[in-house]
Amino acid sequence: MDFFNTIGLNHYLVISAILFGLGLFAIVTRKNAIVVLMGVELILNAANINLLAFSKYNGGMEGVMFGLFVIVLAAAEAAIALAIVINIYKTFNTVDVSSIDSLKE
Amino acid sequence: MTNTTYTVIFYLFAAITVFSAAFVVFSKNVVYSAFSLLFTFFGVAALYVFLSADFIAVTQIIVYVGGILVLLLFGVMFTNKIMVTNLKTEVLNIVPGILLLITITGGLIYTFLTRADWYTTDDQLQGSVVEKIGFETMSRYVLPFEMASILLLLALIGAAFLARFDNPRKMNEK
């Protein structure tokens, strides 16, 4: 029972593993490109939890700084990905990633 | 705050994060997924506070909830017909997906808990981390900081260029 009573590094690692698995599941199984993007965001959040947890239990600042840069990159990635999805919608009139199989109209 | 209260609040936020993330993934309705993602981001921000990274938690709320989630909702609304009321997403590869989910998550948890003997120190991060982030940003991480600013500018220009409504070259071809 000691594992459940004192919060340690392992608890955060378990949460991040679950979030990573769920994000991967969304990427593999969903047809809608927006939901695939949500899966990518879940995976980025899982990685960020890991970075901050290791940073806290190591006593250093490296993980915190990396976490900050991960959030910056996630913002840029979301903006570009949404622009691409909107372009795909304008071209093919759908965002179903399994039916988009050509590079030109 | 006693240790029991701390533990209970931690498990509360952990449960909010995991269950809302599961709802994001398993919900058929895209709009429900997007709004459930809101609770996931808030739960993750609360976990960041537990990890004594308060600045990252506030950044998470501002950037993810205020920026990325609004962008995703905009994408959901924009890429569906206005008259269609059921914003459903279809599912494919459900059995391989669930197999992958169980194996990846179980394997990661098994490796994290039993095989990996992580180094931990008693000299953990304590209290607020804002001042340290200021010093680190202006000393060791100046170059990544500037590169991040350039990257954000390029992403802004690129996204605005890609998502433009009236492409003049295309208009001339027609």
Image: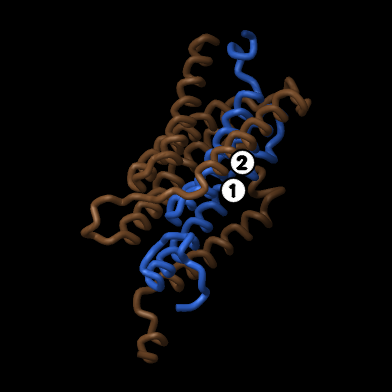
On screen, B122 above or below A82? Answer: above
Q: Residue at x 64, y 37 (%)?
A: B104
Query: What is the spatial separation of the Cα atoms under label 2 and label 1, in whole angstroms?
Result: 9 Å
Q: Secondary structure at mark 1?
A: helix
Q: Determine crowd level at label 1: few under 14, some 14-19, many 20+ residues with C-alpha closer than 10 A.
A: some
Horizontal placement of B129 versus B21: left or right? right
Residue highlighted by disc 2: A47
Q: Colour of chain B?
A: brown
Horizontal placement of B74 versus B53: left or right? left
On screen, A70 above or below B16? Answer: below
Q: Where is residue B36 drawn, in percent x and y? A: 38, 38
Q: Can residue A42 be seen by looking at this rendering? A: no
Q: Secondary structure at mark 2?
A: helix
The chain drawn in blue is A
User: Closer to the observer: label 2 or label 1?
Assistant: 2
Q: Residue at x 61, y 28 (%)?
A: A14
Residue highlighted by disc 1: A70
Please, what is the three-letter code of the amino acid marked with disc 1?
Answer: Val
Q: Determine crowd level at label 2: few under 14, some 14-19, many 20+ residues with C-alpha closer than 10 A.
A: some
Asked if the residue under mark 1 is in contact with the one under mark 2, i.e. CB atoms within 8 Å, the reply is yes
Q: Nearer the viewer, residue A73 or B86?
A: B86
Horizontal placement of B74 versus B98: left or right? left
Q: Nearer the viewer, residue B171 or B152?
A: B171
Q: Where is residue A74 drawn, in percent x and y? A: 54, 52
Question: In terms of image quadrants, where is residue B150?
Answer: bottom right
Farthest residue, direction front: B95
Q: Nearer the viewer, residue B98 or A17?
A: B98
Question: In terms of image quadrants, where is residue A6?
Answer: top right
On screen, B174 above or below B24? Answer: below
Q: Where is residue B43 drawn, in percent x and y? A: 46, 32
Please, what is the three-letter code of the amino acid marked with disc 2?
Answer: Ala
